[in-house]
Amino acid sequence: MQADDRLAAIQARIARAAKLARRDAADVTLIAVSKTHAADAIEPLLAAGHRDFGENRVQEAQTKWPALQERYPEARLHLIGQLQSNKAADAVAMADAIHAVDRLSLVTALAKAMDAQDRRPACFLQVNIGEEPQKGGCAITELPALLAAARDADLPLAGLMCLPPAGVEPAPYFGLLGKLARDHGIAGLSMGMSDDFETAVMIGATHVRIGSALFGDRPPVRTPTGFRKRA
């Protein structure tokens, strides 16, 4: 299946889910997660008219996106992975949105970088919705303090973001993130990936992050004993 066909298929599924939820599909931003994929795999989606893309790592994004954005200046880059505070300035310089703001030190670093560069990418606060120690995101109980700090720092808050636990029904976790957003007067919800984005749309996602359904499996990882499939 060609890139434009895959894109159209995903857009149709988003539209069906939105219709079931009596929502406007135009209110859902499809972020094509292009992490680990080379520029030549990304360009067909750009040529098909798609403009929102997600990368996990600043360093990887820096190798691909300056050249791509020269050819497609309307392309919008979303940083969706964990962000080190010492990469805040680089993130602010290149991203249109940052989806994993999860701690006070990062809020401080981003605010400083935004003031210095006079550039203000949208920010989503990541919540560890499943209380999983191996995942990023602030604890649910710490969200009010993180929100207050972000507002005090005048970060442009766009919403909340989460990654529900793998292998279980995601709907309760999406519902909880939606309740937290409503309780705190926040509109955006960055939630839903290739396996569960329709559920996320029906529960209120404003941004869905889809990689494998658009690009196929990510390239294998080179190891000392050969290659293995990425998780």
Image: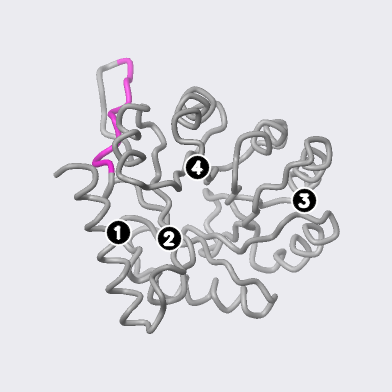
Q: Amino acid at mark 4?
A: Glu
Kindly report the distance in space between the C-alpha atoms of the residues bearing marks 2 and 3: 24 Å
| Marks 1 and 4, the one that precedes in the sequence | 4
Specify the segment rendered in magenta: 215-224
Q: Nearer the viewer, residue 121 or 190?
A: 121
Can you say which quadrant of the picture contains the N terminus? Answer: top left
Q: Residues within 10 Å of mark 4 (few under 14, many from 20)?
A: few
Q: Amino acid at mark 2?
A: Pro
Residue 90, quarter of picture: top right
Q: Residue tagged by mark 4?
A: 74
Q: Residue at x 76, y 49 (%)?
A: 107
Kindly report the distance in space between the C-alpha atoms of the residues bearing marks 1 and 4: 28 Å
Disc assigned to residue 165: 2
* Image x and y of residue 88, in percent: 70, 36
In reply to whether residue 222 is colored magenta, the answer given is yes
Q: Residue furthest left?
A: 1
Q: Residue tagged by mark 3?
A: 104
Camera-side mark, 1 or 4: 4
Kindly report the distance in space between the C-alpha atoms of the residues bearing marks 4 and 3: 31 Å
Secondary element at image label 2: loop
Q: Amino acid at mark 1?
A: Asp
